[in-house]
Amino acid sequence: DAPEPAGEALLEIRQAHFARPQKNYYQRPPQIERGYREQMYGMDGRSYLDMVNNVAILGHGHEKLAAAVGRQWSLLNTNSRFHYAGVAEFSRRLADLAPDGLDTVFLVNSGSEANDLALRLAWAHSGARNIISLLEAYHGWTVASDAVSTSIADNPQALTTRPAWVHAVTAPNTYRGPHRGPDSAAGYIADVEAALARIEASGERLGGFIAESVYGNAGGIPLPRGYLQEVYRLVRERGGVTIADEVQVGYGRLGHYFWGFEEQGVVPDIITIAKGMGNGHPLGAVITSRAIADSLEKEGYFFSSAGGSPVSCTVGMAVLDAMRDEKLQENARIVGDHLRRRLEALGERFPIVGAVHGMGLYLGLEFVRDRDTLEPATQETAAICNRLLDLGVIMQPTGDHLNVLKIKPPLCLSPQSADFFADMLERVLEEGW
Ligand code: PMP
């Protein structure tokens, strides 16, 4: 037999057949075939600390999850038009995690699908099409979730190609937006009011509002104090539906909160989740009220072939069990707070560190060329990420300027691994780029 392709040959096969818009993290990526907890093991014999994997929240190679999935596969996997315990129990557990009144669940397979469905629910419930979304946002790749995605880092043409029903408002970025600091909500709210006035002036109505409730895609930046409280009020006053995209920041990652919207002291009409809830298995969900869920029946029934399957429900419950048993939200808080202090100390030594954003194990380290002008250090950030790979750390940039390290490792991250990351970063900053 011919040897299995590896190295350059394997990369060439990937480049030849795996469609190009599906980017690699690296130009010369290590080949990784195994992982355990927050470590990944390359075929080059090296281990890499995975600091970007917001999907594998339990960590890689989780034995109990693997055993539960294997057991369920050997028993049954089918669709939710059949009746089995998993779909009832998992739906109830998700409803129990949500605030009172949000007790009804749709089970799908990804964050894009969850946001797509949330938008359809907003349309069906409000009877109106117009949606307000934030600039710098990413909500998914399906037609509707892509329409409300405004991030120019993900799509350089985003701002000129959104459909007319999408009304993008200024990203409430308290660090580099037009209004700064935690008490800058009023300026951003005025922008939402202006968008509402434009919709009304055109004789149309509002369908809803979608936003991450801690701004993950901008680098883990909390929204200004009181922002969502007022925006949700304005949206509801006009019959619109409020959607909290908790795909990245929700589900325990913030450590101090299970949901991002708790940080703003609000309750949305619809919560969307995915990523971590399946630890990498394709799982997504929409959690909402019975009344909003039922409004979809105006458009017919809803069916997802694999959404809520016995295997998917088993995965979802095994993830929740592990989060509880391994105290992962608490770990995110304790190790995240420790890592934040280490990063803040780097900020005191190196002027390129403009700010440390975020909380728990969703942190953003923003690099600037000048602390007054906040000129983004985009090329430097790319060079720092490449050098970190040499040193055994997987790290990637985010934000419209790709100048923020998105620090979102598995929630089982040990304090030693957090220190290793901070030590390697310190070394790179000492070396220069
Ligand atoms: N919403 C947010 C905030 C996300 O970060 C992502 C994925 N990066 C999505 C939605 C889409 O999720 P998926 O990739 O599972 O479709």
Image (cartoon, rainbow, N blue to C red):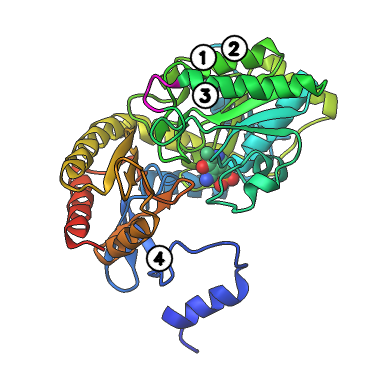
Q: Say whether residue 28 is left or right of residue 421.
A: right
On whether residue 263 falls in the magenta region, the answer is no
Give the residue at mark 1: 229
Q: Are marks 2 and 3 in contact (CB under 8 Å)?
A: no
Three-letter amino acid code of the residue under disc 1 = Gln
Q: Quadrant of the C terminus?
A: bottom left
Q: Is 102 situated left or right of 184 in this image? A: right
| Residue where numbered disc 4 is placed | 33
Q: Which mark is residue 188?
A: 3
Secondary structure of the residue carrying numbered label 3: helix
Check whether the beta carbons of the residues at disc 2 and disc 1 lie within 8 A of each other: yes
> Which segment is the magenta one?
180-184
To which residue does mark 2 refer? 233
> Where is residue 281 shown, x and y percent of the image?
52, 47
**Mark 3 nearby-residue class (10 Å; few <14, some 14–19, many ≥20):** many
Does residue 127 appear in the picture of this structure?
Answer: yes
**Which of the labelled discs sits on residue 254, or is there none?**
none
- Gap between marks 3 and 1, in whole Å? 12 Å
Query: Where does ligand 1 appear, by image quarter?
Result: top right
Mark 2 and mark 3: Cα distance apart in space: 14 Å
Q: CA distance from mark 4 to mark 2?
A: 48 Å
The residue at the point 40 percent across, 49 percent down is: 53
Q: Secondary structure at mark 1?
A: helix
Q: Position of residue 340 (x, y in %)?
A: 24, 37
Dividing the picture into quadrants, the one containing residue 322 is top left
- The first of marks 3 and 1 along the sequence is 3
Cα separation, mark 2 vs mark 1, equals 6 Å
- Which residue is at a point 18% across and 53% down the rendered structure image? 426
> Decide: marks 4, 3 in contact (CB < 8 A)?
no
